[in-house]
Amino acid sequence: MRGASSARIIGGYPKVITAVVGGKTNLEYLRDLENMDPNKGSHESRWVYPEAGKIVAKMLTTPTRTTITLVIVKAEHVLGPTQDNTWRIVLGMARERGLHLCPPEVGPALLLQYPDLIPVGYDARIGMEPFKDISGVDKVLLLQRYSGGLKLFVQRNVSDFTMIDDLWVFVKTPCELIKIPPTS
């Protein structure tokens, strides 16, 4: 399913969109991403960075197809004028403003539904509970738009910092999806 072009971020923030999540396994998400990839069968996917693919392969998904309302904000909208901008501070301030964590499947779902969601040169981090790699490094999924299109990446060391003009995706209204525990 492709998203409406009106959801594309061109100017002001925050932007509110809806996305359909659930009803697929993690492997079905990977298959759907591979099927939309014009480089299908080649060494590297055009749409999914290998490390992001590993996270998608391990993530828990919800069995029920659900439409959720998401908000895309600049970090400055949740932080205000502050120099303290770690992931935990962004998360805390987002919660104070009524926003909630995304299930990890929001990353691949947005890539499948809104391939032109963010403008070239921007990243949108998924406001999700970080995954930890075997060395304990925190990671979240992020969408990055470059001239070739939108790609699913991993933001490493997310607990260390975030830039004030970074984009973040959070759930606008709480739902049962958000209670899915993270996997490592």
Image (cartoon, grey):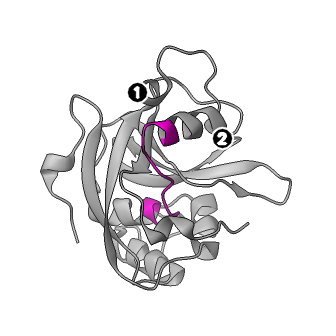
Quadrant in which the N terminus is drawn: bottom left
Q: Which residue is mark 2?
A: 158
Prevailing SS of the magenta stretch: loop
Which amino acid, by three-letter code, is at mark 1?
A: His
Residue 148 visible in rendering: no
Q: Earlier in the sequence, mark 2 or mark 1?
A: 1
Task: Give the residue pinned by disc 1.
Answer: 77
- Residue 94 in percent (x, y) is at 49, 38
Foreground: disc 2 or disc 1: 1
Placement of 125 over or under 115, stated as above or below: above
Identify the image quadrant of the C terminus: bottom right
Where is residue 13, by image quadrant?
A: top left
Please provide the residue range marked out in magenta: 95-107
Residue at image position (49%, 84%) is: 25
> How packed is label 1: few (under 14 Cα within 10 Å), some, or many (20 or more)?
some
Task: Classify 10 Å Cα crowding around label 2: few (below 14), some (14-19), many (20 and above).
Answer: some
> What count of labels does the image hold?
2
